Amino acid sequence: MAFSSGFVTIIGRPNVGKSTLMNLLVGEKIAIMSDKPQTTRNAIKTVITTEDCQIIFIDTPGIHKPKTKLGEYMVHVAQDTLNEVDAVLFLVEATDSKPGAGDLYIIEQLKKTNTPVFLLINKIDLIGKEQILQIIGNYKELLEFHSIIPVSALKGEGKDIIVKEIKKVLPEGPKYFPDDMLTDQPERVIVAELIREKILQLLSDEVPHGIGVEVLSFKDRENKNIIDIGATIYCERDSHKGILIGKEGKMLKRIGSLSRVEIERLLGQKVFLELWVKVKEGWRNSENMLKTLGYKK
């Protein structure tokens, strides 16, 4: 039996459900999720391996108009993957009957590539069949898609169809990763992202976008089944530091408690988590800080 393999990028506007879709496809929570735009900052690879193929999915930051060096980095990450993959999954929202400015911008980028593009219409559980047909018609006028697949990443609808359709365009190739590997992300990176996810979920819009997380220590406690983890949360203002810590440290404790539950699930053992908050004004425009936090081209 011939074995096929290849890379597939997931692109779309911020907050259309790219990370939720990727977690659905791989069957595990790898990418963090929140209801805020620009949650994903790096290209995260996840892997599905079957008897006859291996698909490597790349979840990218949402394509948007950048306002900081971090924003520029995120957009470059998303755009650079288009010509380096075997297929593109372009995710749009079913609740938007017509393509918005962000969708139209992405379509213009897709016109420049010869890579097969699959249009995935997400959140179909929120609308009727007639509306889905209308959306399909609107997008068909703009680009010749290899396939159009209605899905619900949250409800788990469309996963098998997506995988089946992708297999059709993959070239014969080797296994790039071991059978049991789900992601290329080191555990320290996923831990930092899980902490940032809790901040995104707990705090108002302004604070989380100026947040970065660095895992400073990650080691097994001697003779005990416990991992000691220490992490610093960077923010851009003293007022944000106060919000992150909260009255009598309650917010920081809550962030730590919720993060620890997720980290223990990921690592499969007990975790002792210590968090610190530091102010680094303008860190999103600092090349050194971006490299420190792992945002490297």
Image (cartoon, helix red, strand yellow):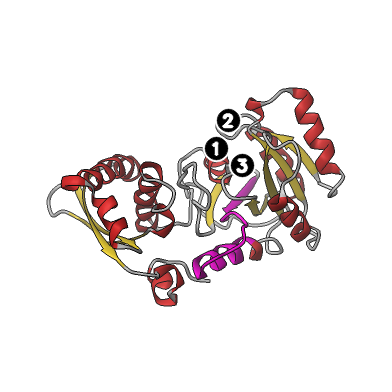
Image location of residue 144, percent across then percent down: 85, 48
Look at the picture and state if 161 lies above or below 241: above
Q: Is 50 colored magenta in this rendering? A: no
Residue 7 visible in image: yes
| Left or right for 151, reference 110 | left
Q: Tell me the SS state at disc 2.
A: loop
Residue tagged 3: 51
Q: Residue furthest right?
A: 141
Say which amino acid is labelled 1: Leu
Q: Earlier in the sequence, mark 2 or mark 3?
A: 3
Tag 2 near tag 1, CB within 8 Å: yes
Q: Earlier in the sequence, mark 1 or mark 3?
A: 1
Choose mark 2 or mark 3, whichever is in front: 2
Q: Secondary structure at mark 1?
A: helix
Q: Nearer the viewer, mark 1 or mark 3?
A: 1
The Cα atoms of the two marked residues, 2 and 3, are separated by 22 Å
Which residue type carries mark 3? Glu
Q: What's the distance in space between the residues labelled 2 and 1, CA to CA?
A: 7 Å
Name the residue tied to disc 2.
156
- Name the residue at 53% across, 71% down: 297
How far apart marks 1 and 3 lie (CA) works out to 20 Å
Give the residue number, with chain letter if any, for mark 1. Answer: 24
**What residue is rendered at 34% in x and 57% in y?**
188
Q: Give the magenta-colored segment's residue range.
A: 53-78
Pick the quarter of the image with the N terminus. Answer: top right
Q: Residue at x 56, y 56 (%)?
A: 61
Q: Nearer the viewer, residue 203 or 146?
A: 203
Q: Secondary structure at mark 3?
A: loop
Q: Residues within 10 Å of mark 2 (few under 14, many from 20)?
A: some
Mark 3 residue crowding within 10 angstroms, few (<14) / some (14–19) / many (20+) = few
Observer-nearest of 6 and 191: 191
Q: Tell whether label 3 touches label 1 (CB within 8 Å).
A: no
